[in-house]
Every structure is written in C-alpha cells, then in structure tokens.
Amino acid sequence: NWRWAAMSDAELDSAAAPLMYLAKSDERSMVKNFSKTLSPAAKRKFLTEFWQKRDPDPNTQQNAARERFYDAIEFANRSFSESTRHSQPGWKTDRGRIYAKNGAPDDVLRRPAGSTLPYEVWRYTRGKNRYYIFADRTGNGGYNLLQTNDLTESSFPGWREILKEDAVQDIGRYVGVDFYSGSNASSGM
C-alpha cells in the first residue's frame, strides 16, 4: 500500500492531482473528481490500483514508474514554480507538465532575452523524437509552451511572430526543422 496509508486526506489529494498527465481516458473523470467524491479509503484504493497498472516489475516492492513520476513532480515544483500574481506549483506549469510526462530532456537550448523573448527548446531523442519550444512572454520566469511536434500537446498559432525570425531560425537549426517551409532537415525529426 506504499505510503498511502500514512497520508492525510489533503496529501492524498495532492498525490492524485498530477495524475491527470498520465491518466487514460477512462481514469480522467475519477482523477478530476478525486478530492470531491471519494472517501479517504477509496482514495487510497484508487491510488494503489492506478500505480499497480503502471508497475513495470510487479515482482518487486518498488514501483519504478511511480517513483520516477513523483520525483519528476518534486523536481518540477523546485525548478518551475511561478511566483507571480497567480502563483502555482511547478508541476502545473507548461515546463513542469512536460517534465512530469517525459522526464528530463536529452538536450536543452537556452537563450536569454535579447532581440527576442527568453526561450528554451527541450529535445527528447529517446523513443519518439520530440521537441518543445517554451518562451517567457511575461519576463517573470513563466515559460509557456509555444510549439511542439508532440500531438498530445497544443501549440500556439502565432508563435513565430512572438519569437521573431532570428529565434525561429535558431530553433529550427537546433531541432532540424525549417519552420517557414515546413520541411524536416536530415536530423530525422
């Protein structure tokens, strides 16, 4: 029963909230209504069963998938929290969500503010090649996802105008995509 038995009702709610990133369609309504509809015992049961389904090696005491996920949530909270007018934990930010779903990127391109907004590009080369383009549109460290080739995420339609041509070309060289013609370079992305 992992640590669920020792957790308070509020801690169980906190443990369940980011599961929306992993939940399958039949689990989403349960995760969404978790704090409103379930008793503490039902919450513990749901969390136990949720992670049992995702355990890569059920013959061990440890669930590596669960450990990786909650480590990613902790990292996201330390690294990506936004302390703006509408403060939110790091796992709820765009970078935190991508980190929680995919782990650490394989490569990162970071550019400070200059002739354009500060931006970061995260590349994942394990499995499916993915890239995520984030920009700090407010100047306070709150990076938003602007563009990605991940079909489960949304892209911002006017992202090229936001970042300006030099930045878009810089990013295109990094990920191997000509964002103006739509063609992929030889990098296989």
Image (spheres, grey):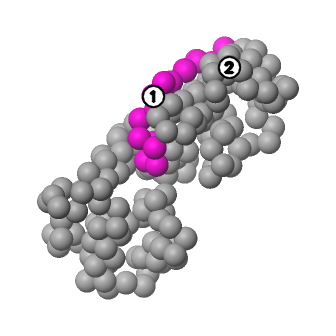
For marks 2 and 1, give the one nearer the viewer.
2
Task: Residue 181: name its quadrant.
Answer: top right
Amino acid carrying label 2: it is Ser
Q: Which mark is residue 186?
A: 2
Task: Residue 41: name its quadrant.
Answer: bottom left
Disc 2 to disc 1, C-alpha distance: 19 Å
Where residue 130 appears, x then y in whole percent? 58, 36
Residue at point 29% right, 60% down? 55
Residue at point 62% right, 52% down? 152
Q: Check disc 2 and report its element: helix, strand or loop.
A: loop
Q: Looking at the image, is 69 positioned above or below residue 113?
A: below
Which residue is nearer to you in this view: 89 or 67?
67
The answer to whether residue 31 shows anywhere in this view is: yes
Q: Which mark is residue 106?
A: 1
Where residue 119 appears, x then y in whole percent? 61, 26
The answer to whether residue 87 shows anywhere in this view is: no
The magenta-colored residue range is 99-114
Can residue 66 be found in the magenta stretch?
no
Figure quadrant of the N terminus: bottom left
Task: Residue 38: name its quadrant.
Answer: bottom left
Amino acid carrying label 1: it is Asp
Q: Which mark is residue 126?
A: none
Q: Earlier in the sequence, mark 2 or mark 1?
A: 1
Residue at point 74% right, 43% down? 156
> Image check: 174 left or right of 80?
right
Q: Looking at the image, is 59 positioned above or below residue 76?
A: below
Residue at point 66% right, 49% down? 151
Figure quadrant of the C terminus: top right
Q: Looking at the image, is 139 positioned above or below residue 36?
A: above
